[in-house]
Amino acid sequence: MKLNDKILLGILGYGKRDEYYWALRDDIASCVVEEVSLVYLDNKRNVVGGNLCSIKDIGDCNANLYYEFTGYLMLLEEFIKIDAIQKYAKVILLNDTATSHHNWKLWKHSIVGASKIIPPHCVIGDLRFSRSSIGDYNFIASWMFVFSVSDLCAFRIALLECLNSVTKNKNNYFADTIHYYGLHLDKVRRKKLVEWLFSDNKYHGWIQAKPFEEMPKEVRYRKGVAIELEHNFSNSLSTRNFNLLDIKRISIVAYIANKHDRLLNLYLRLVCK
């Protein structure tokens, strides 16, 4: 093993026991010969831990202010504190939906494979893309990112830019009528957002989709802000000249895992409707 072949793994969770993070780390480590070092943040318990830092309470620091995006920023801040970070070659960032919303047994092999081939100034992730009559719609989903340690600072700056952007219009997601909901978005993004969140079609949309009036205001706000952040972060990365690579185009296993996820979500929607 070369000195700089090591993997820096950051895991973000919400209300998970410490053992959960170590089990995920062991899953990744079982797929590689390289050393995998862990830093995790539970942004409900406000606890940071791992083998690169002792478990510590970080207090009321708004770790969940903007959901996983604020949490990821805090993980990056912990990474920067690591001595001799040049020993590490690549970073894997995950949140706990990796196991709750995805076929983790398949995805873990693809993520590890991606970490072995990541070129400089690239981010490998789960890209979502669709075309419509009014324009294209694409972004990198926020549950997983793979990139080089050498790009850590640039990745952090892109995330900061993303977080600064959402504060300007977030109150639009508290709108009392669907007409004003997310009104600041361009027509392509707003149409996709409204169709996905408030669809009454059991074959289309979010698994918990329901009419606007029936969805709690706090859920409408949380999902609207989180989805906007995914798009803004994708744009920030591109603006900083990162190449966004779709893991499903790199790994046949990821392609199969994605198909499995979609079939499972369709089944759950059919059962829930």
Image: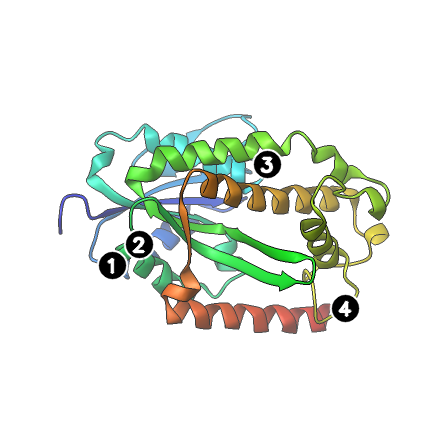
Q: How many residues crowd around disc 2 within 10 Å: few (fewer than 14), some, or many (20 or more)?
A: many
State yes or no: discs 2 and 1 in contact (Cβ < 8 Å). yes
Residue shown at the point (56%, 55%) measured from the top left:
138
Q: Nearer the viewer, mark 2 or mark 3?
A: 2
Q: Nearer the viewer, mark 2 or mark 1?
A: 2
Q: What residue does disc 2 label?
A: 115
Q: Say which amino acid is labelled 4.
A: Asn
Q: Say which amino acid is labelled 3.
A: Tyr
State yes or no: discs 4 and 2 in contact (Cβ < 8 Å). no
Q: What residue does disc 1 label?
A: 32
**Quadrant position of the C terminus in the picture:** bottom right
> Would you identify the image quadrant in which residue 115 lies?
bottom left
Instruction: Point out the tag, 2 or 3, that comes first from the N-terminus.
Output: 3
Residue 201 image label:
4
Look at the numbered disc 4 and give the secondary structure of its residue. Answer: loop
Q: Nearer the viewer, mark 4 or mark 3?
A: 4
Instruction: Point out the tag, 1 or 4, that comes first from the N-terminus.
Output: 1
Instruction: Point out the tag, 4 or 2, that comes first from the N-terminus.
Output: 2
Residue shown at the point (55%, 38%) measured from the top left:
44
Give the Cα separation between the discs numbered 1 and 4. Answer: 42 Å
Give the Cα separation between the discs numbered 2 and 1. Answer: 10 Å
Residue shown at the point (68%, 52%) measured from the top left:
188
Q: Say which amino acid is labelled 2.
A: Ser
Look at the numbered disc 1 and give the secondary structure of its residue. Answer: loop
Look at the numbered disc 3 and give the secondary structure of its residue. Answer: loop
Q: How many residues crowd around disc 1 within 10 Å: few (fewer than 14), some, or many (20 or more)?
A: some
